[in-house]
Image (spheres, rainbow, N blue to C red):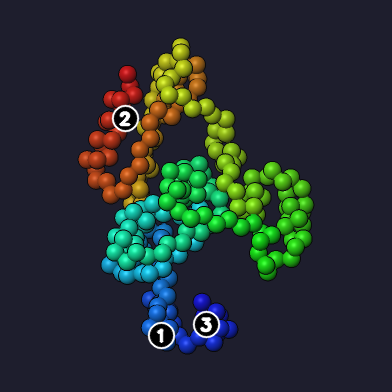
């Protein structure tokens, strides 16, 4: 930011402690993080005309930031919001919903590949493809990072081969069940109920995720999952 101010000739005061830039016309630029609840809380009660969130594909708490913190600000100010990033690393989450899922119709979409960058030489992407990906244009990293595509990377999955069912297949009986809890002290709590059948196959029977849960809600969720799936 300092470099941009210097090369542009703009007059501005930079407050390093508060990550705040105040321009000579009174406009301000404020930088904030989203790695935990405390950082998001610093945004509450503020007033922004333009909100830009970068690297959305890497932000695990993008949903809570948008709904719990920025929602009221955007509504009151009629703010313009820009979400930017490469393709989603997973097939779930707020960023995936915005780009291709249930929330995509509420947003205006713009996509650019590496070739659309005017500062990059015309043959740079072809060199990247040949040197880093062996000329394989179907490589998921190449497609996501250089072509701006949303592609599912099965190499990131513990079980890359899976099928979706509305109910257990015939003749499958669950004889062992485990409920795992990922307690988020700053972010969401996640629950997953996994069953193992008598044939040795594993099934994800139930999942849940929510913010700000106390001990009672956690135990109630575990009990609900157990009672629901034990039969």
**Mark 3 or 1, which is nearer the eye?**
1
From the top left corner, tell me how far across and down residue 203 is, in percent. Answer: 45, 26
In this image, 223 relative to 27: left or right? left
Q: Is residue 93 visible?
A: no
Q: Quadrant of the C terminus?
A: top left
Residue 225's tag is 2
For image coordinates 68% across by 45% down, the residue present is: 139
Upstream in the sequence, badge 3 or badge 2? Answer: 3
Residue 16's tag is none
Cα gap from disc 3 to disc 2, whole angstroms: 55 Å
Question: Height in image: 163 above or below 92?
Answer: above
Residue 25's tag is 1
For image coordinates 32% across by 66% down, the residue present is: 77
**Mark 3 or 2, which is nearer the eye?**
3
From the top left corner, tell me how far across and down residue 201 is, in percent. Answer: 50, 22
Cα gap from disc 3 to disc 1, whole angstroms: 14 Å
**Mark 2 or 1, which is nearer the eye?**
1
Question: Height in image: 129 above or below 201?
Answer: below
Upstream in the sequence, badge 3 or badge 1? Answer: 3
User: Would you name the residue on which mark 3 appears?
Assistant: 5
**What secondary structure is marked by label 2?**
helix
Residue closer to the observer: 55 or 147: 147
From the top left corner, tell me how far across and down residue 204 is, in percent. Answer: 43, 29
């Amino acid at each position: 930011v300092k470099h941009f101010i210097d090369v542009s000739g703009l007059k501005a005061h930079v407050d390093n402690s508060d990550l705040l830039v105040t321009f000579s016309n009174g406009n301000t630029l404020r930088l904030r993080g989203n790695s935990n609840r405390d950082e998001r809380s610093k945004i509450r009660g503020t007033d922004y005309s333009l909100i830009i969130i970068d690297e959305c594909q890497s932000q695990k708490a993008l949903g809570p930031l948008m709904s719990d913190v920025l929602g009221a600000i955007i509504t009151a100010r009629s703010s313009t919001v820009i979400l930017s990033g490469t393709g989603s690393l997973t097939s779930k989450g707020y960023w995936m919903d915005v780009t291709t899922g249930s929330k995509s119709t509420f947003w205006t979409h713009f996509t650019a590949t590496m070739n659309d960058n005017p500062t990059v030489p015309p043959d740079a992407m072809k060199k990247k493809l040949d040197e880093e990906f062996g000329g394989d244009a179907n490589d998921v990293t190449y497609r996501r990072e250089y072509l701006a595509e949303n592609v599912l990377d099965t190499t990131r999955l513990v079980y890359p081969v899976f099928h979706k069912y509305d109910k257990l297949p015939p003749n499958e009986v669950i004889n062992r069940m485990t409920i795992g809890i990922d307690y988020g002290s700053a972010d969401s709590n996640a629950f997953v109920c996994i069953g193992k059948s008598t044939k040795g196959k594993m099934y994800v029977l139930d999942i849940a995720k929510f913010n700000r849960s106390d001990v009672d809600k956690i135990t109630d969720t575990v009990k609900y999952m157990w009672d629901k799936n034990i039969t």
